[in-house]
Amino acid sequence: MSTAAVSAPRVVRTIAELRKEIGNYRAAAPQGGKVGLVPTMGFLHEGHASLIRRSAEENGLTVLSVFVNPLQFGPNEDFDRYPRDEKRDLTVASEAGANLVFMPDVKEMYPRPSQTSILIGGITDRLCGASRPGHFDGVGVVVSKLFNLVQPDRAYFGLKDAQQVAVVTRMAEDLNVPVEIVPCPIVRDADGLALSSRNVYLTPEEREQALVLSRTLRLVPEWIREGLTASELTDRMKRQIREMPLADIDYVEALTYPDLLPPEESAPLASSPASLLVAVAVRFGRTRLIDNILLPAAKG
Amino acid sequence: MSTAAVSAPRVVRTIAELRKEIGNYRAAAPQGGKVGLVPTMGFLHEGHASLIRRSAEENGLTVLSVFVNPLQFGPNEDFDRYPRDEKRDLTVASEAGANLVFMPDVKEMYPRPSQTSILIGGITDRLCGASRPGHFDGVGVVVSKLFNLVQPDRAYFGLKDAQQVAVVTRMAEDLNVPVEIVPCPIVRDADGLALSSRNVYLTPEEREQALVLSRTLRLVPEWIREGLTASELTDRMKRQIREMPLADIDYVEALTYPDLLPPEESAPLASSPASLLVAVAVRFGRTRLIDNILLPAAKG
């Protein structure tokens, strides 16, 4: 454990420089020095900052990667307009305690098209895996590349993308990647909206109506205590979300976590022997937002 | 560079022991000490021994893995009857200079079914990739696991499976695996038959007729100098192989290497600007044999 001094992180844009910097760190601190990785697509907000701070607390070297990965965007998604702000990202990175920032361009990460794809079956059949075909394959490839480039001891992922956490954890287990995946809690604005780089797309009216997501999710534990089954719960959630005229529901689902299987249909969720993920994806105008709540398994 | 002393290698059967042994080695020799990996399915012959010797020459620690990987066998293939002889394998490993032998069982490598699959497109469309659907996906998973477990500086593969060398090299490049893939020449018996663990399946008559493969491949450079195109070459090879009544051809192909694309159809192979792989897969009785020759690109 060490707390990094708050000083400007070193910025590298090539794989060669990245490997050299990490090699230098490991050579100087070969035994105790741990490396933490925070993989992001940039346009950093307080959610990302919380991951960086956690890594800086737990590791001697914190590597932040900023790369908008074209492979995880579908053909009609927002790759081109995805928000980017390198200067602000470096300020956030510095304040949160990152030591090394890897900011490659697409050519550096994909000098030629990847012939290799990584498919994580089963847990990608539902939620965003169903709505965004190929998305998690793109995540699998870029996360594998970053794991191989940085060889981190720990990697930090936000639970707003709870399915991504499940997918990356499963991939690391299946392939024996020597990394600890550290899931970190969702960070919200004061009004409850889960932080997301895509929130900047929202008009004031859309943003106002989008608060229905966190409001609905906050009620979930109470509704589950009432004895609802999965479909009763998601029906009630959908009714509440649809009260907002701009809300266009992509999915509202309750699944076991981290296996992402449907819970037993006729049983009250309150008696679920597995942890539960209740997750929503809803479009407001052109902007698709996701949010979720993770609930522990019922006690024996 | 160091030559390992010829002493009995240490045998480990669990991932935990493997990681501990490699960690111990790296801790004792943190800078100069390189780790070489020779992944095999056991039933070792002189071809495997040549890989181990090469690794022992080039690395401070040579790890041999012996694991018959169920994922790379098709449902009607020879997983169950694939030859196994642990005791002999350890003798070969010891004589060739392996330091550490990893012999996991299936439960250790796959404690539950892998939800993660690795597909290497393009270069797996032809040759064994076409004849053995799913084969290279299984290779991709197990090789990725071994790379993550051993984190070798170099990994040694025999060119008898030239497509496997191309596939593993491409996967390592696409995913930025920090390993050098070292392709090693085919080793043959005195009569020309390429060494293979599957050769033990052959009856004396089948073995005699199987010599047609190396005999035909030896003529390929001369036939290419005559000015043949790819289809003229492979037609002539097929005619020669079919003179053996037990030969049942799976494929005979001439492709660029390592991209495994068809060369220009109307051009003589002698003028190919790319390296060429001329590869055959032929069944003799129940046994499918592969062999090949790799030819350098035509000089400017």
Image: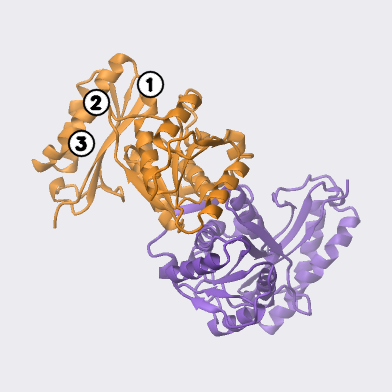
Chain colours: A orange, B purple
In this view, the residue in front, B280 or A143, is A143
Horizontal and vertical percent position of residue B175: 56, 48
Q: Chain of mark 3?
A: A
Of residue B45 and residue A265, the one placed in the foreground of this image is: B45
**Picture quadrant of residue B204:** bottom right
Q: Residue furthest left?
A: A226
What element does badge 1 sit on? Answer: helix
| Residue with the mark numbered 1 | A200
Q: Nearer the viewer, mark 1 or mark 3?
A: 1
In the rendered structure, the answer to whether residue B246 lies left or right of residue A115 reads right
Mark 3 and mark 2 residues within 8 Å of each other at the beta carbon? no
Mark 2 — residue?
A190
Same subunit, labels 1 and 3: the answer reads yes
Residue sticking out furthest to the right: B226
In what quadrant of the picture does the N terminus of chain B appear? bottom right
Q: Residue at x 33, y 45 (%)?
A: A183
Between the residue at mark 1 and the residue at mark 3, the CA separation in whole angstroms equals: 28 Å
Q: Chain of mark 1?
A: A
Q: Which residue is mark 3?
A: A234
Q: Is residue A163 left or right of residue B9?
A: left
Residue B263, given in percent of the width and then of the height, sits at 77, 47
Q: Secondary structure at mark 3?
A: helix
Q: Earlier in the sequence, mark 1 or mark 3?
A: 1
Of callouts 3 and 2, the N-terminal one:
2
Q: Amino acid at mark 3?
A: Thr
Name the kind of residue labelled 1 in the image.
Answer: Val
